Amino acid sequence: MHVHNMAITSHITRVGPTMALLVCVLVFICKAQAAAPAVYILGDSLVDVGNNNYLPLSLLKANFPHNGVDFPMGKPTGRFSNGQNAADFLAKKIGLPSPPPYLSSPPPYLSLTGGATPITGMSFASGGAGILEETGGFLVKQALSLGKQVEYFTRVHDKLVTQLGPSGAQAHLSKSIFLIVFGSNDWFAYYNVGSLAVKQYNPQQYVDRMVSTFKGLLKTLYGLGARKLVVSGVGAIGCCPIKRKENRTGECNVEINYWSTKYNDGLKIMLEGLKSESLGLNYAYFDTYGAMVNLFQNHEAYGYSKIKEACCGIGNLKADGPCIPLATYCSNRTNHVFWDLYHPTETIASLFAGYLYSGSQQFMVPMNVEQLLAL
Ligand SMILES: *[C@@H]1O[C@H](CO)[C@@H](O)[C@H](O)[C@H]1NC(C)=O
Ligand SMILES: *[C@@H]1O[C@H](CO)[C@@H](O)[C@H](O)[C@H]1NC(C)=O
């Protein structure tokens, strides 16, 4: 389908505008072939496609070089990556364009009008965001929390109802994919210097708060019509350069990793419970943690010689500072796991999106996205 698509595009560029009619026909066919009407993305910087560009107070932005060095035209877009991120790759695999940032100006959802083609998705993802309301404010001064993202989705939902009618909106949403990538920042915030949460809650209590808050917001999404959830667990974030640099020999931080797995255990139980009490709800869970550990253990086989230091950054493991224009970046991005102190390179995002879409039960339970789409 994608190869097909690309072949069509290059063909069209060669033959020029006389083929406009053919283009329309082909675009129509391509749209009809997409496995879902839309993909809605809620998450943090792992899947942010530029929402934070529109948050004036946010300290976590990526709309400057060297971010985007491998993006088409080398353009920094607000993605925390050298190129595309997992949201882009997953949308492409589903056969849809990468959803635009909700905060784009003018807001893309406002252009939805009666009779127009329904939207093919929207991204609410925001760098620094957490499941817990306080996480974003603590880490980066301004980010769209999961709660805020659900609130913004409600506005899109209401617009869809106006456009398609209640049953049309319901049909659209029940077949749409909801990719939800959260949790890392809640743990970075918990273990950050000056954290208030660490004084108020022990790690198990914090796990419970994260899971119950998440569950409440997923119930809201279900109430609004979401039926196909793709939820990622927290990765081995103790192995990010920001955490490795705190260790003299560059080892992973075992405590944050341990509590990330404890959280993931709670998340999996919660998802199974939510499914059993929500008629028609299905989900695909991605074991990001397992996928990362597997990658580190077999990194040579995967072609990654650089698993500890970031490609772009400043200082020790390039993790003393973010990827700003003054930082240096590596010449080979395809042998580095990490682009900057927190985020993976484009090729890793592509690898993981491949797991999400068609991966085995090793990392995708109880099913992958392809199977979720077929329901
Ligand atoms: C570095 O990590 C190793 C392995 O987790 C641990 O045993 C050691 O205590 C750590 N050292 C420091 C200075 O944190
Ligand atoms: C970059 O690294 C990859 C993976 O190790 C390797 O296959 C490729 O040849 C390298 N590219 C350059 C230009 O060195």
Image (cartoon, helix red, strand yellow):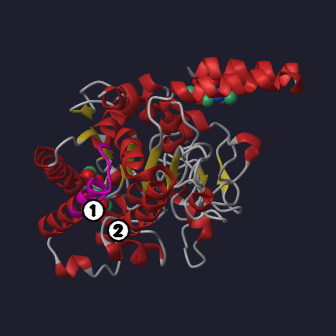
- Please state which of residues 307 and 220 is positioned toward the viewer in this rendering: 220
Q: Earlier in the sequence, mark 1 or mark 2?
A: 2
In the rendered image, is residue 238 in sight? yes
10 Å crowding of disc 1: few (<14), some (14-19), many (20+): some
Q: Quadrant of the N terminus?
A: top right
**In the image, is the residue at mark 2 within 8 Å of ligand 1 by its beta carbon?**
no
Assess disc 2: are there few (<14), some (14-19) or many (≥20) residues with their C-alpha within 10 Å of its C-alpha: many
User: Measured from the top left, where is residue 183 in percent x and y?
Assistant: 32, 58
Secondary structure, mark 2, is helix
Residue 304 seen in render: no
At label 1, the amino acid type is Leu
- Residue 13: x %, y % from top left: 83, 25
Q: Quadrant of ligand 1?
A: bottom left
| Image location of residue 36, percent across then percent down | 44, 34
Write down the region rendered in magenta.
216-229
**Secondary structure under the numbered disc 1 in the rendered image:** helix
Q: Are marks 1 and 2 in contact (CB under 8 Å)?
A: yes
Residue designated by label 1: 217
* Left or right, 28 with reference to 351: right
Foreground pick, 352 / 95: 95
Report the number of discs.
2
Quarter of the image where one finds residue 263: bottom left
Residue 78: horizontal and vertical position, in percent? 62, 58
